Amino acid sequence: MQRSHTKNCPRRDAWFGPMAAACWLTAVAMVLAGCGGAVPSGRRAMVCFVRTPAQDIELVEVSRTVPADGPLAQLVLEELLKGPTLAERNQGLTTLIPPEVVVKAVTLDSGGTMHVDFNEALQERVGGSMRVTGIRRQIQATLLWIPGVTSVILSIEGRTEDILQP
């Protein structure tokens, strides 16, 4: 999987170090000023969006910060369903998951299998094997980075059979 933050590094001319330090200090000062001196706490999470060149689906991991408390899988799925940010869309990222999708339940069994139940919207207007495969891969890859998760089973309104068919 390609990470979206892996880009070509800019040339490191003589001015790069001092300029980067100045930018970093300015950014920190702006964050602290805007937050009343407190840095928001949270956990780093990864969600997967897609870039769809030609007849292929490329999964791209992007970083998100989710609250430190609360169920990690639920929070990560909420970030996934929000879709890519404007900046990420400008980089060619998109989501294949329809915007009306809602997570109804998330459970992790003792064997490491994450069970995720969605509403019917997950399979509405999603014809085509490439798109259906992309939806599955996007959700599974987003959840498989979570410690303890070894596999993912998707369901729609409790059904696991005959869902997300092309």
Image (cartoon, rainbow, N blue to C red):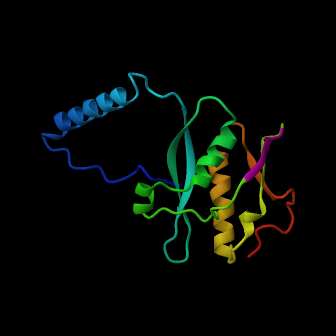
Determine which quarter of the picture holds residue 86.
bottom left
Determine which quarter of the picture holds residue 91.
bottom left
**Is 86 left or right of 130, judged from the image as shown?**
left
Magenta-drawn stretch, dominant element (helix, strand or loop):
strand
Which residue is more in the foreground, 60 or 84? 84
Can residue 91 be spotted in the picture? no
At a point 73% along the width and 45% down the height, the residue shown is 150
Which residue is more in the foreground, 96 or 40? 40
**Is 122 left or right of 21, judged from the image as shown?**
right
**Is 32 left or right of 55, judged from the image as shown?**
left
Counting from the top left corner in percent of width and height, residue 165 is at: 77, 73
Which residue is more in the foreground, 94 or 50? 94
Does the magenta segment cover residue 37? no
Residue numbers of the magenta segment: 103-109
Badge count:
0
At a point 50% along the width and 44% down the height, the residue shown is 63
Does the magenta segment cover residue 106? yes
- For the C terminus, the image quarter is bottom right
| Residue 91, placed above or below residue 54 | above
